[in-house]
Image (cartoon, rainbow, N blue to C red):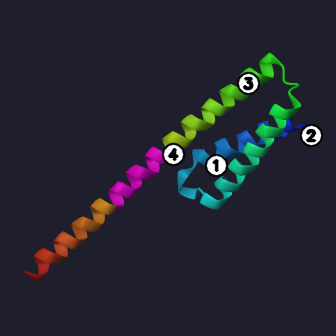
Amino acid sequence: MTPLEQLQKLDEQLLRMLANPEELDENGVAEQLATRARLLQDVIELGDVSKSESAELIKRSRQLKEAAEQTQRKLGEKLKAMHKGRRSVQAYQTVKRS
């Protein structure tokens, strides 16, 4: 399997991982991204990528970036809701004790 094919397979895995933020494994994503960086470096060093393969790689990179940003927003909103819930419980406890 060529580095470009490995990269395509890895990108598909990353997109699947990012599609489900609740089950996201931070270490798993970090490992996948490190592997992706190495594969990209290999592809660049080999330099035998056609224009269509290059365009497809750029398209997948943009999809990954957008998926990561969307996942980040979802997790941020979830964290915000959790903090809001904690503050509500703390306020309730304070009022209850008064």
- Label 2, label 1: how far apart the Cα atoms are: 22 Å
The earlier-in-sequence mark between 3 and 1 is: 1
Main secondary structure of the magenta stretch: helix
Q: Are marks 2 and 1 in contact (CB under 8 Å)?
A: no
Q: Quadrant of residue 46?
A: top right
Give the percent coordinates (x, y) of residue 19: 59, 44
**Is 42 on the left-hand or right-hand side of 95?**
right
- Residue type at mark 3: give it: Glu
**Towards the viewer: 44 or 52:** 44
**Which residue matches tag 4?**
71
**Towards the viewer: 12 or 2:** 2
Q: Are marks 4 and 2 in contact (CB under 8 Å)?
A: no
- SS of the residue under disc 3: helix
**Is 63 on the left-hand or right-hand side of 74?**
right
Q: Residue at x 24, y 66 (%)?
A: 87
Mark toward the viewer: 2 or 1:
2
Q: Which residues are magenta?
A: 71-82
**Which residue matches tag 1?**
17
- Label 2, label 3: how far apart the Cα atoms are: 18 Å
Which quadrant is home to the N terminus? top right
Q: Residues within 10 Å of mark 2 (few under 14, many from 20)?
A: few
Label of residue 28 in the image: none
**Which residue matches tag 3?**
56
In the displayed orientation, state which residue is furthest to the right: 1
Q: Residue at x 76, y 49 (%)?
A: 35
- SS of the residue under disc 2: loop
